Image: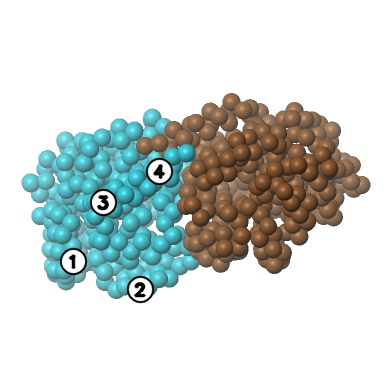
Chain colours: A cyan, B brown
């Protein structure tokens, strides 16, 4: 079953200790699509400006991502500039230009109305909720969020959480939102607000799945070759949702395997600059990395 | 085979968001002994002052720790005071009184000369090296260290690393010592200095084993009930060494299992204040926690 993703498509300017790249393909929906597209078909709903290079459109095509929901609006594409230093655990945002993304009100195309697996990438919770309500019969809807919305749209976010199945967010955001220092406790507080599961992303430290059925901590894959962490979290979500869509298995055991796939795909992403690592990976690379992760954790 | 540990025995004053305790039993060799003692026999070499309470000596006796190597010196026992705040990832040291530990030059008793498994807990590298040389035929010698020695005794530490089999240290210390932001790279640089393996402890984020045979990242056990992280790292080392001593298996696969035991024991430690969690645990609790960890990581 295809995965539907709604989120940002951006032109990123990235600086890490390993290099610098200007106006490269980025955005949450981009990383998610290229990641999920390694495991299943992807339907992309997003917006770009008239300046969006045709070559970047080809990147989606090459992965088989369905871009019928990719709107071209008058104006410029969303731009983000960020830098990573030292251990590269956190991006320092240097500039954000929302451009056409700032006024984007996503419409799910008629052809996508039967989508069963939906990912609402980071964005305004009221916009995320409006999209969610366009897909009333979806099997599994998962959303992401970030500190800006937690601080400024807490009520809308709480309403959204009452209507989704899963939430993915990072550890700082989880603490900010749930108001506890303990991440397991944070996850449980989110569960009380509606979702069936929460995944807390901890960057190089891995992830934590919290559900009624249990708690599972997984490490990140210990790659020695991290070039650029941009998009790791969205790639993780893409690998996770791609696996769930491909198997239809969102049981607790299925979620654990899905998070294993998310971990595998994210590790391929960070080994390249921008989307390069994801673009050059194929299905076999993902399987090999997943099996290597499973093997590492078997003792 | 028994494990020999050389390290500090302290009276700790600890403050966490969950409480405060004064002059409770602490120190690296204490946590190590009580942890390793859950899995095998332990021989303790250390020093206390004349003020050391007899009740604390009973704690070792109750776990079956051999304290024939525990010296009572004229003066006061080593004291440490620390506080943990928020997510309790790092102790803030409020006071240190080395007292009798400051001039301690450990002598391995004749009866311990046949020890095959040795842990040199954090201490001056030149003192650690002197102990190591008292046990020339030991099968496996592992040492710990800390930022103070990395900054002030780098050469002695390098010499020590040329004569031990394994090094255990935390992530900040690994970065400080090896001069890389990437922990896998840090581990590899340490391997070049002599040890067969390095274990980097990441607190609530788990641990990383780096050896010629491979790299293994394990998460911490996701307990929701962290009361006091004091001694978690030494308990981890104790669980690890106790398992190796009990099985004689220090192969790469054996090290992975040993680190699983370290992870299990450390999680029992942090669930209690001071040594309470460790003291109330028994062998079955460790096995149950270890199996629960293995099960969590199976997908």
Q: CA distance from mark 3 to mark 4?
A: 16 Å
Indicate the chain on which mark 3 is placed. Answer: A
Label 3 near label 2: C-beta < 8 Å?
Answer: no
Residue B43 shown left or right of residue A140 in the figure: right
Q: CA distance from mark 1 to mark 3?
A: 24 Å
Residue A96 vertical position relative to residue B120 in the rendered view, above or below:
below
Taking the spot 82% from the left edge, 50% from the top edge, the residue there is: B106
Residue sticking out furthest to the right: B74
Upstream in the sequence, badge 4 or badge 2? 2
Query: In the figure, residue A88 lies in which quadrant?
Result: bottom left
Residue B229 on image: x %, y %: 61, 43
Q: Badge 3 local density, few (<14 within 10 Å), some, or many (20+)?
A: few
Q: Which residue is mark 2?
A: A20
Q: Which mark is residue A295?
A: 4
Upstream in the sequence, badge 1 or badge 3? 1
Q: CA distance from mark 4 to mark 2?
A: 35 Å
Q: Which residue is mark 3?
A: A284
Q: Quadrant of the N terminus of chain B?
A: top right
- Residues flagged by tags 2 and 3 on a common chain: yes
Tell us which disc is closer to us: 1 or 3: 3
Residue A44 vertical position relative to residue A50 in the rendered view, above or below:
above
Indicate the chain on which mark 2 is placed. Answer: A
Q: Badge 2 local density, few (<14 within 10 Å), some, or many (20+)?
A: few
Residue B229 shown left or right of residue B214 in the figure: right
Q: Badge 4 local density, few (<14 within 10 Å), some, or many (20+)?
A: few
Tell us which disc is closer to us: 2 or 3: 3
Residue A149 on image: x %, y %: 34, 52
Residue A270 shown left or right of residue B241 in the figure: left
Q: Which mark is residue A56?
A: 1
Indicate the chain on which mark 1 is placed. Answer: A
- Circle 4 — which element? helix
């Amino acid at each position: 079953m295809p995965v539907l993703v709604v989120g940002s498509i951006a032109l990123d300017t990235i600086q890490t200790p390993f290099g610098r790249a200007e106006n490269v393909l980025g955005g949450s929906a981009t990383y998610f699509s290229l990641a999920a597209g390694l495991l299943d078909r992807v339907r992309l709903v997003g917006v770009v400006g008239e300046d969006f290079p045709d070559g970047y459109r080809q990147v989606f095509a090459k992965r088989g991502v369905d871009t019928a929901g990719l709107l071209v609006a008058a104006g410029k594409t969303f731009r983000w500039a960020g830098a990573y230093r030292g251990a590269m655990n956190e991006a320092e945002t240097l500039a954000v230009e929302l451009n056409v993304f700032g006024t984007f009100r996503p419409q799910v195309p008629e052809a996508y109305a039967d989508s069963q697996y939906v990912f609402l990438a980071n964005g305004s919770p009221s916009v995320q909720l409006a999209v969610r309500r366009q897909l009333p019969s979806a099997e599994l809807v998962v959303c992401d969020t970030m500190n800006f919305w937690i601080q400024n749209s807490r009520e809308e976010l709480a309403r959204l959480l009452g209507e989704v199945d899963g939430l993915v967010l990072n550890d700082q955001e989880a603490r900010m939102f749930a108001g506890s220092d303990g991440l397991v406790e944070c996850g449980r507080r989110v569960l009380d607000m509606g979702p069936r599961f929460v995944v807390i992303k901890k960057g190089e430290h891995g992830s934590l799945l919290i559900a009624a059925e249990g708690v599972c901590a997984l490490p990140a894959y210990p790659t020695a070759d991290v070039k650029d962490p941009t998009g790791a979290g969205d790639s993780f979500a893409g690998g996770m949702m791609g696996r769930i869509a491909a198997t239809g298995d969102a049981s607790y055991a299925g979620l654990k395997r899905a998070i294993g796939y998310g971990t595998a795909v994210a590790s391929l992403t960070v080994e390249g600059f921008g989307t390069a690592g994801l673009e050059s990976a194929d299905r076999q690379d993902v399987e090999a990395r997943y099996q290597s992760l499973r093997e590492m954790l078997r003792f």
